[in-house]
Image: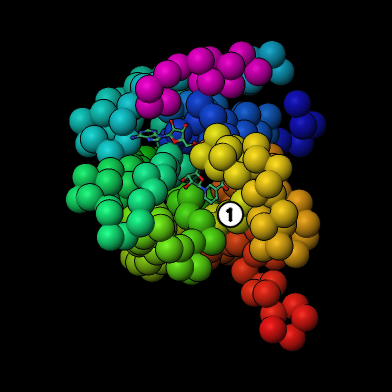
Amino acid sequence: MASYQRLKDSVAMITGASSGIGKAIAIEMAREGASVVINYHKTSEGAEDALAQIEAFGGKGIIVKADVSKEEDVKQMFDKTLEAFGKLDILVNNSGRQVDAPFLEMTLDEWEAVISTNLTSQFICSNLAARQFVKQAEANPSQEANAIGKIICMSSVHDMIPWAGHVNYAASKGGVLMFMKSIAQELAPLKIRVNAISPGAIKTPINKEVWSDPEKMPALMDLIPYKRIGKPEDVAKLAVWLSSDESDYITGEAIYIDGGMMLYPEFADNG
Ligand code: NAD
C-alpha cells in the first residue's frame, strides 16, 4: 500500500473492471486508498480476483454485476454503491467491446451493440454520477477548492484515427471524445471534472488475436515508435493521477497513452 494515498477516502466506480484495463484501474485506485466498485458484465471470476488482490493489501471494494448499456442495471449499481459506501467521488467509464466487420457486411445489430456498450453506457453512467455529485455537494457544502466529482471516459486513439473494418468502434470512440468535451464544458462551473484517456495498443483480452500471434506483432510495432505494447498498469497509473487532486486544473482533456502511435510513425523516414 502506498504510504501517501492520493485517493484516500474516495469512492470510485469502475465499469468493466473484471479484466484488462478496468481491472488494473480498480486495483491501482484501491492501492491509492479508494474504496472501489468493481463492475462486471457476464462472468465474475476476474472481479473476484481483483477484489482478492485488493483485500490482500488491506483495500476495500464491492463487486456489482451490471450491463452498463441498460439503465436499470446501472441504477441498481449506483444503489449498491451508496448502500455500501454512502457516496461516489470518481466514475471510470471503462467498459467497451469490439464487434468487427467490413462496412459492406456490417449489420445494424453489430453497429448498435458497440454504440450502446461503448457510448450510450457512458451517457447513462455519467448522467447518474453527475447528479449524485451535485446532490452530495448540496447536502454537504464545503469550502474546499477542489472538484466535487471526477469522471474519466475511456476512449481510444481511434477517437482520432479512422479504422477501416471497425467503423462501429471508431464511431463510438469519436462520440466518446465529443461527449466528454461537451459535458466537461457544461459541468465545469459545478466543479465536476471530466476527462478522457485514449489508449493505443494495450495488452488485454480485447486485442489478444494481435499480441498472441507472433506474425501480427511486427506490423503492430511499426505503428508504435516507443516499440512496446502498453500494459494495463500504464493506463491505471494515469487514471489515478487524472482522478486525484494533483490534476485538479485539468478538465475536458483527452490524454493519449500510446507509445507515440499518434505521431504518424509512417512519416518518420520522411514518408
Ligand atoms: P477487456 O475486454 O479486457 O475489457 C472490456 C471490459 O468491458 C470487460 O471487462 C467486459 O466485461 C466489459 N464489458 C463489455 N460489455 C459490457 C457491458 N455491456 N456492461 C458492462 N461491462 C461490459 O478490454 P480492455 O482493453 O481492458 O478494454 C477496456 C477499455 O479500454 C474499452 O473501452 C476499450 O475500448 C478501451 N481501449 C482498449 C485498448 C487496448 O488496446 N486494449 C485501446 C484503446 C481503448
Which amino acid type is marked by label 1?
Answer: Pro
Looking at the image, residue 37 sits to the left or right of residue 25; the answer is left
The residue positioned 32% from the left and 36% from the top of the image is: 68
State which region is magenta: 40-53
Callout count: 1
Residue 13 visible from this viewpoint: no
Q: Mark 1 points at which residue?
A: 199
Reply above or below: 59 against 98: above
Reply above or below: 134 against 261: above
The residue positioned 62% from the left and 34% from the top of the image is: 24
Image quarter for residue 203? top right
**Residue 242 percent coordinates (x, y):** 60, 52
Asked whether 173 or 220 is in front, the reply is: 220
Asked whether 122 or 83 is in front, the reply is: 122
Could you tell me which secondary element the residue under label 1 belongs to? strand
Q: Quadrant of the C terminus?
A: bottom right
Looking at the image, residue 226 sits to the left or right of residue 182; the answer is right
Label 1: few (<14), some (14–19) or many (≥20) C-alpha neighbours in 10 Å: many
